Amino acid sequence: MKRSKKSILLLLGVLTGFLAFSCSNTNKQKKTTKPNVVFIITDDQGYGDFSAYGGAKDAQTPYLDELASEGVRFTQAYVSMSVCSPSRMAMLTGRQQQRWGVYNFGARFPESEITLAEQFQANGYHTAMVGKSHYGPVSGPGEPEFPTSHGFDYFFGKEGGTMDYLRHKAGDRKGFSKKMANHLGVGPFWENDQQVDMEGYSTDIIRDKTIQYIDEHQDKPFFLLVSFNAVHLFTHQIPEADLKLMGIDKVPDWDPVTGDWDEYLEWYVNTVRPNTPEGRQRYLYHLNKLDEAIGAIHNKIKQVGIDENTIVMFISDNGGSPRTYAENTPLKGNKYILEEGGIRVPFVMSWPNHLPKGLVYDKTVSGMDIFPTIHAALDFELPEKHMDGINLLPYITGTNDENPHEWLFWTGFHLKGKPLVYDDPNGALARHDKTYNGDNTGWAVRYKNWKLRYYGRTDAYGLFDLDKDISEKNDVSAKHPELVKKMTKRFFEWHDEIKKDHVNYDIPEASEF
């Protein structure tokens, strides 16, 4: 039987449509086999510098606000330490970093610790880190603290606590000692075990590499840790074209040719707050660029059609720094100390059709909860280790209305040992350290709505009802001596339990430098 040309074309159209639908459906199924995870960490971003939290009026973060509106925003989220590398380690393991003797910047992964990236690898995921890696000293590939040594298949970024915003070539290290170039984060990026010269502004570079990674891995399950160096110091560093648009002058970087270590510290003190010209304006430049970069990453996830199958998490590693003009409003304090402004951070988690949309969750959670929560969400088996974090899913989905953490604990920098003693109390190093006024022998406890603060230097206590006094203005310790006694006793019980683990680790101390 002959068919008309018209009927043949119609049949071909139907077949083409069916094949297109089938192909589309196959791709969709491929993208929904295992959820992807994108974990974004910012550096020293203040609680008030995220406009959904309603803190600083001059800080507008529309793209972060959009992410928060699509998921769960936590208002009482804490990190385990008031500085970056220890808190990052706790998030990546679900465990208090004090368990292996880390109380300060000296943070290295013992081989026996298991990271979130290693767990993803074991469950068939491709794993990647883009940006700043600060899990120990700058040591290069093959060392335990290098990202590819603890679970990441791919790493593009720099090691160390500080990353230069603009100088990303091997030639930029000319004139620097190796120690100073590493300390300041001057020089090329690592791409796995190769060093790569780059042009441009670090936030843009991290954004572009992240988008490239998503493009290349969208059809297979992946775990991607995006670790921005913004808004860490040195925030005076802004591309010259943007300085001209802003109408402000360039602030000179430290010149290693004419300066020794003490002269560097003098330059440092005279460059950070309160001595940075237009300091808040410069900080907001970096914050706005950071927000735009996160928006571009979020939009990329949507553009390639994997948003409904991707868990996106956002957190700051600690409170805003007093050196950069960050704002932690309405919280008291800042990075380096254990007031709320040092340890309470913005935290958002989004997973369309799985987590509530637009939920504001007001009970106590921790960055350490990320590890067990992701395990529960993806049905991974937890390691056979004590978890200090807990699975948040029952709490944020409404099946458990209790407080996730009745107790949380924090230590100062030198609770394990002796505080620093300066040969010259008025010297450059002592004055440098006073720019942050970090916690030495102090500690803190959160119990339900109560916060107990032991200040260390003055041998004094402060007790605050955070439900009524989020800014820690009204010390009520004199009215509740039994509560102070109870919380103090519980802190030392916790710390004695932690210290039992120290015999199992041999972790050398390391300083910020």
Image (tube, rainbow, N blue to C red):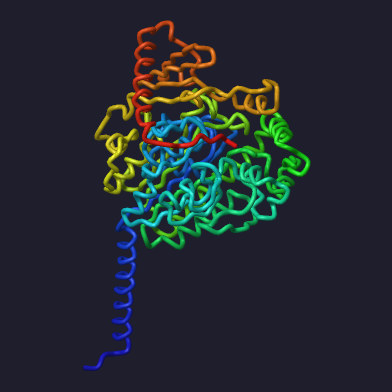
In front here: 144 or 289? 144
Residue at image x 71%, y 32%?
262
In front here: 366 or 30? 366
> Residue at the left extreme?
1
Q: Where residue 373 sits in the image (x, y, percent)?
A: 32, 41
User: Is residue 350 shown above or below 320?
Assistant: below
In front here: 13 or 167? 167
Q: Where residue 94 sits in the image (x, y, percent)?
A: 36, 38
The answer to whether one can see residue 408 in this image is yes
Q: Where residue 88 sits in the image (x, y, percent)?
A: 46, 39
The image quarter in which residue 452 lies: top left
> Residue at the bottom extreme?
1
Residue at image x 59%, y 41%?
162
Q: Quadrant of the C terminus?
A: top right
Q: Quadrant of the N terminus?
A: bottom left
In front here: 114 or 203? 114
